[in-house]
Image (cartoon, rainbow, N blue to C red):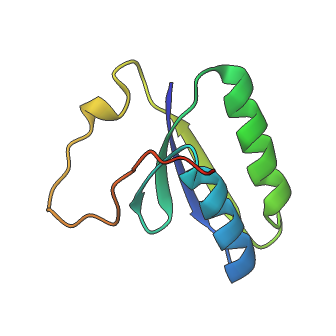
Amino acid sequence: MVWLITYDIADDRRREAVAALLAAWGARVQYSVFECEFPDATVAADILHRVEELIDALDDQVRVYRLPGEGAGGVQIMGRRRLEEREDFWIV
């Protein structure tokens, strides 16, 4: 299940906290856009609830789009610039 999550967060600390949380679940495809893959709806709801707790509802905005069946595979990308590649890693 792939989700597109975008945000406009006014405060650097809140923005970094949200980015760190989302980076654990997906790739940053634009400065304020992540493509996240959650294993099921329960995990997605938990992560989105955590995002909601991190933001200031009066100053920030987060938009969440659940992508249809083919997920991010149906996305057309123009241009070659990349912000980062998602790499799996282990913390020991």
Quadrant housing residue 79: bottom left
Position of 45 relative to 20 (above/below)? above
Seen at 39% across and 50% down, the residue is 86
What x and y, as percent, mark residue 30? 39, 63
**Residue 11 visible to an observer of this rendering:** no
Residue in the foreground of this view, choosing between 91 and 7: 91
Quadrant housing residue 60: bottom right
- In the picture provided, is 48 more to the left or to the right than 53? left
Position of 50 relative to 37 (above/below)? below
What x and y, as percent, mark residue 55? 78, 63
Position of 50 relative to 2 (above/below)? below
**Residue 82 visible to an observer of this rendering:** yes
Seen at 72% across and 42% down, the residue is 48
What x and y, as percent, mark residue 8? 60, 68
Q: How many marks?
A: 0
**From this viewpoint, which residue is outermost toward the front?**
92
Seen at 44% across and 45% down, the residue is 88
Seen at 34% across and 35% down, the residue is 72
What x and y, as percent, mark residue 19? 60, 62
- In the picture provided, is 15 more to the left or to the right than 75? right
Position of 43 relative to 9 (above/below)? above
